Image: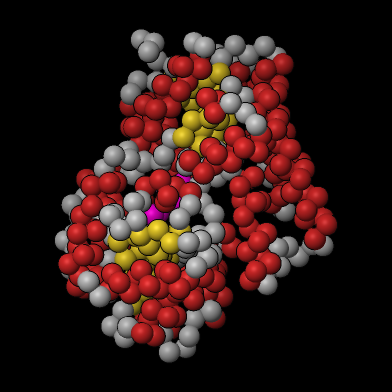
Amino acid sequence: MMNSPLRILTVADTPCDPNSGAAGTVYYTNQALREIGHEVDEIWADDLGPRRIAHGNLHSLLEQPRAYRQAVMKAIATKDYDVIQMSQPQAYLAAKALKQGGFKGLVINRSHGVELRVDEVLPYWYQKLGVPESRFPGFLTAGLRKLLQRQWHEVIKYCDGVIVTCEDDSHCLVSKLNINADKIKVIHHGVPEAFFNTPTQSYSLERHQQLLYVGQSAFFKAPLILAAIINKILLSNPDVTMTWVTTVNSHNYLKSLLNAQILSRVVFLDWQPQEKLIALYDSCGIFIFPSFVEGAGKTSLEALSRGLCVVASNQGGMKDYIKSGENGFLCEVGNSEEFVNRISLLLKNLEFSTKLSKQAVTTSQSYTWKKCATEATRFYIQALFK
């Protein structure tokens, strides 16, 4: 390990918001890197210039790579850095410009969920559930996807290393891009200190009968599967309630997926600040997380830290955190019946659920942002001294 602090520049095309997914990851990692002695500068979405292309994939293809390149080259013109870490494959033009310009430091890409794996998983579920993948013709969507996938090949060519959030993402990059596994580092997300510093509430019958979901309502989060699970569980268990936390713009659509008989027992909430979110976790006993595909699955780890019994899809970060039957349950992706069976088992056995809750808290304590920063530092230094 080197004795002097590293000079690090991080770049992420997100608002600087500690409560969001990708942005929160960058925010808390940077904070932890500073706490262990490094110098960290940041470029956020507001620093990348105005966004002119509204369409998400077209923005990622045409506008975002150039914005990254312009901002990074401007930054290195006025300051020297040992490490430049950029989020997502749209940073490939910046990585190329750095390497071709003779940049002597490390160029690292950080993925918050590998798009190649998403592209591999989601088309099957769109077709199976009869949901249109896009409002545009299929050949246009497929063509745009292939163009975006090429960005990963450029990332691997010009970056010194890639940080991913789960073993599934690492395996995907190795198998699809045929790269050396040593170039990839799995660094699991941490849990904010407030989740550890606030005493957890004891597991009780009142908590036990309250279900919770916190997350987006995008297709990859499987809201159709979640609605099917909630319908079956609440229709069979009249004392059980559900809280669904997601963007308020999705609430009416999600309500339309639920049986009218249970609507009065389902509470919909918009995004919550951290202190309210902790209190909400503490009021519930079972966390349902049925995503088709995930990177870190951040809220499932937060739920573990507050002692909820997490029932999640067997993939992504959840597969890394959870040992099924010991500190939570893993279910086959998209299998709503298995989710219902696992949740029903928990509801029938308070003693077992209490044991699961305690083990969940114990598991979560090894996932801190300091550990994340320390592992990133080791990865940087190993790459610097190769």
Q: Residue at x 72, y 53 (%)?
A: 55
Q: Is residue 124 left or right of residue 165?
A: right
Residue 167 on image: x %, y %? 48, 40
Principal SS element in the magenta part?
helix
Asked which quadrant contains residue 40, the reply is top left
Q: Residue at x 46, y 35 (%)?
A: 186
Residue 1 on image: x %, y %? 37, 13
Q: Is residue 92 left or right of residue 106?
A: right
Query: Count of labels shown?
Result: 0
Q: Is residue 261 above or below residue 349?
A: below
Can residue 263 be spotted in the picture? yes
Magenta stretch?
296-300
Can residue 210 be spotted in the picture? no
Asked which quadrant contains residue 140, the reply is bottom right
Residue 369 on image: x %, y %? 35, 36
Q: Residue at x 45, y 16 (%)?
A: 381
